[in-house]
Amino acid sequence: MKLTKHATPWLGLTLVVVSAVSLEAHPRARTPVRLPDVPGYLTLKCDFHIHTVFSDGSVWPDIRSEEAWREGLDAIAITDHIEYQPHKADLPTQHNRSHEIAKPRGDELRVTVIRGSEITRQMPPGHLNAIFLEDATRLDTTEWRDAVGEAHRQGAFIFWNHPGWRGQQPNGVAKWYEEHTDLVTRGWLHGIEVVNGREYYPEAHAWCLEKNLTMLSNSDVHNPLNLDYDVPAGDHRPLTLVFARENTPGAIREALFDRRTAVYSDHRLVGREVFLRPLFERSIQLRNPEVSLRPKQRVYLQLHNDSDVPFELELADDVPDLSVTRDLTLHAGKTTLLSLQRGAGGDPGEREVAITYRVKNVLVGPYEALKAAVRVKVRFVGAP
């Protein structure tokens, strides 16, 4: 069809209509986080450090509930600052109000919204989050020990935020103080953020293992989430994985106090081996667990990764009589080939072969990778 100058206005109208339809059709959709449950527990995806306009955030509280729903989260805690209220000229200081606004939207979307606050003090002890509070206003005290003691009296779960934050530790290295020893001794400190935003604190990872504290990974988000994380491109906020008996506030609280958590951040898992091993093993399926090999023959194992984590493997030990792929990435949601080649020798017969890898982005200690084996039944056929 030939366009004339008389048709031009219709073209412009068409573009406007199409644009309007496109905006209207933008989906309000939930994208699940694909990670398996572990034996005996659900794997819940949580963020326990979030700010709104009721302290120094830029977002109305109920938007935080929908952001969490869209990202596939199960629970969040709104943790506005007690002491830092930069918007008080525009909004009254009401320490419980952000939770009161966010919770109904969370209930509607089946996202648990937990009442919390950030006790914002100089180092030591630094910033502490208290969640599962009854009344946040009672934490507004002059002495920081009174605030933490009040949170403890309310049965709160209390953890140390961003221990290596450069605003308080200029070299970015987390440091343990006598005040933290005192908090642990009193039973007033239950966990530490091993990851805050995009920062991993190996010292905090070590302390959690050494002092038997809960590991956490939280966003500490202040902006609208999409300004900090390119969610449409596959980027995601850091999450605390909570291994709970059921998806309820009580079960989440019980799991946190029992240290049943792991860290998920930047396509990396960090935590205790007792939880990370089943997370990895339940994510991976070997599609052809039995193969036959003649001398010098090559076959391929098919490893399917059903999770969102692209696991990075590095061969830990050589395999007798076989050459195998030494470095391998098991891409998220895809099936990857692992090469297996027999040498000229090897006695005929059938045996189970364990190919042991270091999973470089699954850390069971500070910079210590999980070791895991791919087990395959190999039938060696033909004369050597």
Image (spheres, rainbow, N blue to C red):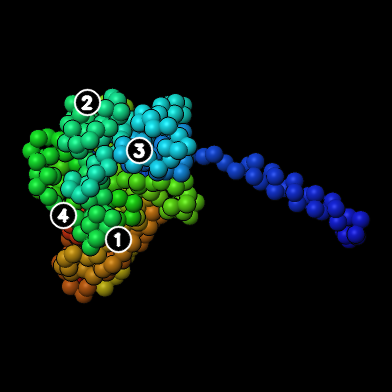
**What's under tag 1, amino acid-wise?**
Glu
**Can you say whether 69 is above or below 374 in the image?**
above
Secondary structure under tag 1 reads strand
* Residue 17: percent from left, percent from top: 75, 46
Q: For residue 175, which numbered disc appears in the image? A: 4
First in sequence: mark 1 vs mark 4: 4
Position of the C terminus, as image quadrant, is bottom left
First in sequence: mark 3 vs mark 2: 3
Q: CA distance from mark 2 to mark 1?
A: 43 Å
The residue singled out by tag 3 in the image is: 80
Q: CA distance from mark 4 to mark 2?
A: 28 Å
Q: Residues within 10 Å of mark 1 (few under 14, many from 20)?
A: some
Q: For residue 28, which quarter of the picture? A: top right
The residue singled out by tag 2 in the image is: 154
* Residue 47: percent from left, percent from top: 34, 41
**What's under tag 3, amino acid-wise?**
Asp
First in sequence: mark 3 vs mark 4: 3
Q: Residues within 10 Å of mark 4 (few under 14, many from 20)?
A: few
